[in-house]
Image: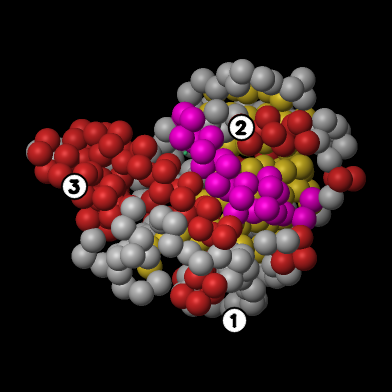
């Protein structure tokens, strides 16, 4: 995805959940042959619809590198220019290891970057223009006195009981003309040819969705982000859709690399996720967990049989001037 492709992302003031869903229908040929993720063009809506896997770890950093590859090393897709960066405040919600905030601060030494997380974040290397605090995104109002020019949140799909509350609070904390950008992944996983259906990989994934829901986390709520942006008052809302193949099956080299990295990330995280969600939450018997994880991990590498992918969505919008 090059700069011009990203620049083609269309803007709208009103988008709907149905439109977001329609954008998820991915042409298999696009995913297997085309080098870049799909850039959605969001049309103005017709009017009526105006719409725990929270690990902080090196796996999180692996995902950071996959995001970088997906977005051609752009840390943000919102149209902020270098003149916007001077002496402006930037905020990273659920900063994790702080890797995004640190890289953004290094790339823009003139910007002031604050990261917050529900648990402690203390990156080994911290540029002077960064700060990190503990804060629950759902505990509002956030105690920050400064207004932010740009607020970022990434991979927060399983973190909120009520994403709308967080989006509204971000709106409050933005200066007029400021941007909120949420970069996330969409559940459920899907495929290009029906090959995920009936697989242990999909069974594993379905179980994680169910377990998260049973503790109040609807990981499918990412699809509602566009309408939640509208409800909060954002304008100039844009969506960008991308995909992470599960495994190295894509023909395009970049997507193949993303697939390999995502497969390795899943290979390392499936067991701890299963321990937590299937063991502690779903109370599945030990043997059932072990069998499911083993067979799902085997599916990850079976690229001749299974061509699944995880859809992803970036939404950004602007607070009116
Ligand atoms: C999957 S990680 C993503 C980390 C980071 N955004 C990234 O992309 O590298 C989710 C992070 O959100 C944090 N988190 C979970 N619930 C939160 C909440 N209610 N408020 C703030 N942070 C939260 C977790 O501690 C974890 O560090």
Residue 180 in view (yes/no): no
Which is more N-terminal, label 1 or label 3? Answer: 1
- Report which quarter residue 39 is drawn in: bottom right
Q: Farthest bottom residue? A: 46
Query: Cβ–Cβ below 8 Å for labels 2 and 1?
Result: no
Residue 68 lies in the magenta stretch: yes
Q: Which mark is residue 84?
A: none
**Is 33 on the left-hand or right-hand side of 316?**
left
Closer to the camera in the image, 121 or 63: 63
Residue under label 2, please give it.
99
Q: Give the label, 3 or 1, closer to the camera.
A: 3
- The quadrant of the picture occupied by the C terminus is bottom right
Is 39 rendered above or below residue 62? Answer: below
Residue under label 3, please give it.
292
Residue at the image position 55 percent from the left and 22 percent from the top: 121
Distance from mark 2 CB to nearest ligand 1 atom below 8 Å: yes
| Residue bounds of the magenta highlight | 56-80
Residue at the image position 41 percent from the left and 48 percent from the top: 263
Residue at the image position 24 percent from the left and 34 percent from the top: 275
Query: Cβ–Cβ below 8 Å for labels 3 and 1?
Result: no
């Amino acid at each position: 995805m090059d700069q011009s492709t990203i620049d083609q992302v269309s803007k709208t003031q009103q988008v709907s959940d149905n439109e977001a869903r329609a954008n998820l229908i991915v042409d298999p040929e696009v995913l297997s042959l085309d080098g870049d993720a799909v850039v959605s063009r969001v049309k103005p809506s017709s009017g009526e619809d105006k719409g725990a896997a929270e690990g902080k770890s090196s796996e999180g950093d692996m995902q950071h590198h996959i995001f970088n590859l997906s977005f051609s090393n752009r840390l943000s897709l919102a149209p902020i220019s270098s003149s916007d960066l001077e002496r402006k405040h930037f905020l990273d919600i659920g900063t994790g290891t702080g890797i995004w905030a640190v890289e953004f601060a290094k790339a823009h030494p003139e910007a002031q970057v604050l990261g917050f997380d529900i648990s402690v974040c203390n990156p080994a290397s911290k540029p002077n223009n960064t700060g990190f605090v503990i804060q629950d995104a759902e505990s509002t109002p956030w105690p920050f006195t400064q207004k932010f020019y740009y607020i970022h949140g990434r991979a927060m799909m399983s973190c909120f009981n009520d994403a709308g509350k967080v989006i509204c609070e971000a709106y409050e904390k933005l200066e007029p003309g400021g941007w909120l950008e949420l970069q996330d992944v969409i559940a459920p996983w899907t495929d290009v040819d029906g090959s995920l259906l009936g697989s242990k990989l999909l069974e594993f994934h379905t179980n994680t969705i169910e377990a998260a829901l049973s503790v109040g986390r609807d990981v499918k709520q990412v699809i509602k982000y566009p309408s939640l942006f509208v409800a909060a008052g954002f304008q100039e809302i844009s969506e960008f859709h991308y995909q992470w193949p599960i495994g190295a099956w894509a023909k395009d080299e970049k997507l193949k690399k993303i697939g390999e990295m995502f497969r390795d990330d899943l290979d390392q995280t499936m067991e701890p996720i299963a321990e937590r969600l299937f063991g502690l939450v779903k109370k599945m018997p030990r043997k059932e967990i072990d069998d499911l994880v083993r067979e799902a991990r085997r599916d990850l590498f079976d690229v001749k049989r299974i061509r699944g992918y995880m859809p992803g969505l970036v939404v950004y919008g602007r607070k009116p001037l």
